[in-house]
């Protein structure tokens, strides 16, 4: 599987990449705006934090296909191996088709339906990001929609991968992996929850206390 971090915090990426097999970093305009500095600076810092291995994803903002293509080229000039996130709206699908001709890899984002994701994949997107928590928040079923999307891609667009996104709980992320998704992107705090639960920390602390109570600082 591929694990991505959904953040613009380069220090957090460097810290988590020490213990997680981070495949790359996803951003969106809201995440990048929260970083409080120009997008180019944020992307360069993330690129450095990732090292030469990981993939970086950044999103276009233009409302029309031509503008999206132009912004995609600008992003790729800055970071040559960047995957361009394109909203899976009508103009976005047109942009994905144009960028496919230029061999610029894309991710269809803002996906709230399995059919919407399928058509972004058929347009040529390499990754599709269903917004799991946002669907749940609207009264939908984000995990079930993601499961449906995974099945549709497997059957009809096997070149494309689900990169499940928008998580507010670790359980949502695990459910998407159990549904067969090959890739997820996690906010830093959700990634940390997997390995920093209070019960785990208490268990490890208890081992230390029991041993030190008997033998102090001696180990062997
Ligand atoms: C992916 O990068 C998406 O833009 C992101 O996961 C959306 O997350 P949110 O619903 O928490 O804003």
Image (tube, grey):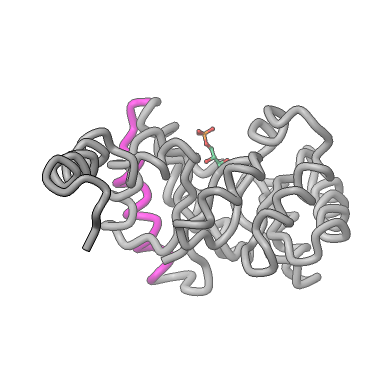
Q: Residue at x 30, y 50 (%)?
A: 174
List x then y, in percent, for residue 87: 64, 44
* Front in this rendered view, residue 133 or 174: 174
Q: Is residue 162 visible?
A: no
Corner quadrant of residue 59: top right
Q: Residue at x 60, y 51 (%)?
A: 14
Which secondary structure is most common in the magenta stretch?
A: helix
List x then y, in percent, for residue 40: 84, 45
Q: Is residue 97 above or below residue 205?
A: below
Corner quadrant of residue 96: bottom right
Range of magenta residues? 138-154
* Front in this rendered view, residue 191 or 2: 191
Corner quadrant of residue 172: top left
List x then y, in percent, for residue 135: 40, 34
Q: Is residue 49 visible?
A: yes
Q: Residue at x 32, y 45 (%)?
A: 143
Q: Residue at x 72, y 56 (%)?
A: 47
């Amino acid at each position: 599987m591929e694990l991505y971090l959904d953040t613009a915090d380069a220090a957090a990426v460097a810290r988590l990449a020490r213990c997680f097999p981070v495949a790359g970093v996803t951003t969106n305009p809201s995440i990048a705006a929260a970083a409080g500095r120009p997008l180019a600076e944020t992307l360069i810092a993330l690129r450095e934090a990732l090292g030469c291995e990981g993939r970086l994803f950044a999103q276009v903002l233009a409302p029309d296909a031509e503008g999206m293509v132009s912004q995609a080229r600008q992003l790729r000039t800055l970071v040559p191996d960047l995957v361009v996130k394109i909203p899976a709206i009508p103009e976005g699908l047109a942009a994905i088709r144009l960028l496919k001709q230029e061999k610029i890899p894309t991710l269809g984002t803002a996906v709230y339906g399995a059919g919407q994701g399928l058509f972004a994949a058929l347009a040529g997107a390499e990754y599709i990001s269903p917004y799991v928590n946002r669907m749940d928040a609207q009264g939908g079923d984000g995990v079930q929609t993601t499961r449906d999307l995974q099945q549709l891609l497997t059957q009809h667009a096997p070149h494309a991968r689900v990169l499940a996104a928008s998580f507010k709980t670790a359980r949502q992320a695990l459910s998407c992996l159990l549904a067969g998704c090959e890739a997820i992107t996690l906010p830093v705090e959700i990634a940390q929850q997997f390995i920093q639960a209070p019960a785990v920390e208490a268990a490890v602390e208890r081992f230390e206390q029991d041993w030190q109570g008997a033998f102090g600082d001696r180990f062997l």
